[in-house]
Amino acid sequence: MPNVAAGASGQRATSAQIWRRRAIDLASVLVPTVLFALARTVDSNLLLLVSIMVYVVLAQGVNVIYGFTGYLPFGYVGFFGAGAYGAYVAVAHLGANAVEATALGGVAAVLVGVVLIPLLRLRGAYFAIASLAAALALSSIVSNPAVTSVTNGPYGADLTRVFSSGGSYWTAVVIVALAMVSVVALRRSRLGLLLRAVRADQVSASCAGVNVVAARTGAWLLSALLAGLAGAVYAWSISVFYPTAVFDTTISLFAIVFALFGGVGTVLGPVVGAVVLYYVYNAIGVNDPQYFQLIFGVVIVIIALFLPGGLAALALGARRRLGARRGLGGAQPVGGSDVR
Amino acid sequence: MFAEQAPSAPSAETRPPGEAGPGNELLVVDGVTKLFGPLRALDEVSLRVNSGEVLGLVGPNGSGKTTVINVISGLLEPTSGEVRLNGQRVSGLAPHRLARKGINRTFQIPKPFPELTVSENLKVAVHASRLADAEILELVGLGGGAERLASELTASDQKRLDLARALVTGPRLLLVDELGAGLSKSELDELAVILRRLVAELGITLLVVEHLLGFLEQVTDKVTVLNAGAIIFSGVLSEALADPTVIKVFIGE
């Protein structure tokens, strides 16, 4: 009997493993979604809850682009602002209802993403700087008095006509669910596999027949969509805003720090990172910004120095150590008969 | 600058029958020059590899062997000259397009995706081979190791994985870059057997860059010798070893 098992059987996951994987995926989507849906019974500050959900979605968007491609998007807020103004234009000029406007905000961000595809030719710091420049340029265009008839220029956007704290809250819950589904699906999909390969070794991936730019474009547009939806629902929830509020570079920075703190490349890390740090920000950042900046600075330094994998790496490490102590984990992969 | 394919180029049919060469030529490297700034890495290099044959490419360090492979596999664009596969110009195409056209390669330092398992490494590649992934792993001697992480493999097995990933794309032309470097005698013998099987059983044409002449002669006796970016000898391996110019290059004065 041992002879039979040696060959191809080792290559297929057992059905028990497949079901376990599906259960984990489902839980990864449902747990955060349900918790946010129930959160209003604990905390009645809906604007705060929407803000947290917005940052959860942004952190997941950063997770998609940084975690899967290694591109650090300092100009990520550009998509957020495009989403906010896309929603405004949809309501003010197209007569859309708030939910339609939120969806159109996502579309607007994807269109900006399409225009910026050439940035994906750049690497590392050049990409980070170029994306920042693009966001600043977009901000200048939107807030230019010359386009007052479209965006109301520097005078701010008004969405009070469609204001609904409950509506924006539930829409944000749905967008969180969508963000979770996106990340889970990306991890399991062929595109996710290709992106992991491209991230590990671009040259190898290209020689294996992977169209590197096309694969990155997929992740780029998905992360643009998430940020656009987040910007649109944020705009809806605060209902009156100025260009400086939705094109604030701090938003990019927060999203990146939240994602890194929780752990990029994981499904739940960015969620935990966004919730924990946003609460910290809300507790001390609003009243004592100088202390908050100090804490944030220290957090960034600690992550960079000691915990590049974020909280998720800490959790995985703890599990591995526990497993090793019990004599379970850390062993050779199951079923991998020694090579040759 | 260059026409996609000159209509006046003599095709196989217009040549008189029986003439050696063109009808059977899979790869033509035609007067390729590659400059890196002031450095002339390749100087008017021309190569022809017939379908089903194995050509060895030898030369001292820095002679441009890997540059030849990088140009053919699309990682580098030639400064001038061109590369043709089956008469069709392919230089200037991106590596992923060339992989789909039937040109693939291995790397001197193998480049698997370390965080992925062996089977995932193969799944990344476009699939055009008539062999299943499991058969390819068996062929290269990695059968049974499909679920191991690539980073856990020994250097020799990483080379096998590199080879397997290239084979998945169903190459007609496989460029093998210093496969033998750093391997033991028994590993070399095994890999030589594998390369011969690729030619005999899968009909793959090989261009083999190799330092180890003992390994190379197990795979082919046809070599081209490169020195300082230029070809100094083309012919049979044993004659190359007797050629004064070649000896001077390899051994010195």
Image (cartoon, rainbow, N blue to C red):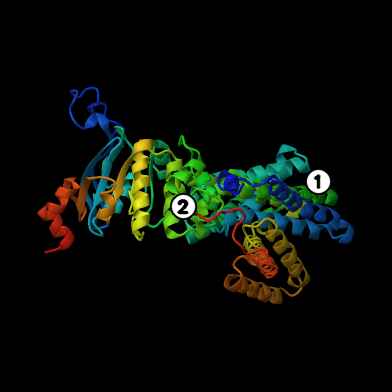
Q: Position of residue A64 (x, y in %)?
A: 61, 53
Q: Position of residue A238 (x, y in %)?
A: 77, 55
SS state under label 2: helix
The correct choice, above or below, for A134 with respect to B95 in the image is below
Look at mark 1 in the image and give the residue it sits on.
Answer: A161
The residue marked by circle 2 belongs to what chain?
Answer: A
Q: Residues within 10 Å of mark 2 (few under 14, many from 20)?
A: some
Can see residue A208? no
The residue furthest right is: A41
Q: How far, Cα to Cα, is label 2 from label 1?
A: 49 Å
**What is the total number of numbered labels drawn onto the structure image?**
2
Identify the amino acid type marked 2.
Answer: Gln
Look at mark 2 in the image and give the residue it sits on.
Answer: A202
Identify the amino acid type marked 1.
Answer: Arg
Which one is in front, A114 or A157? A114
The correct choice, above or below, for B9 with respect to B231 in the image is above
The correct choice, above or below, for A204 with respect to B16 in the image is below
Residue B84 in which image quadrant: top left
Residue B50 in which image quadrant: top left
Residue A283 in which image quadrant: bottom right
Q: Residue at x 68, y 55 (%)?
A: A267
Q: Residue at x 66, y 66 (%)?
A: A320
The residue furthest front is: A1
- Which mark is first along the chain, 1 or 2? 1
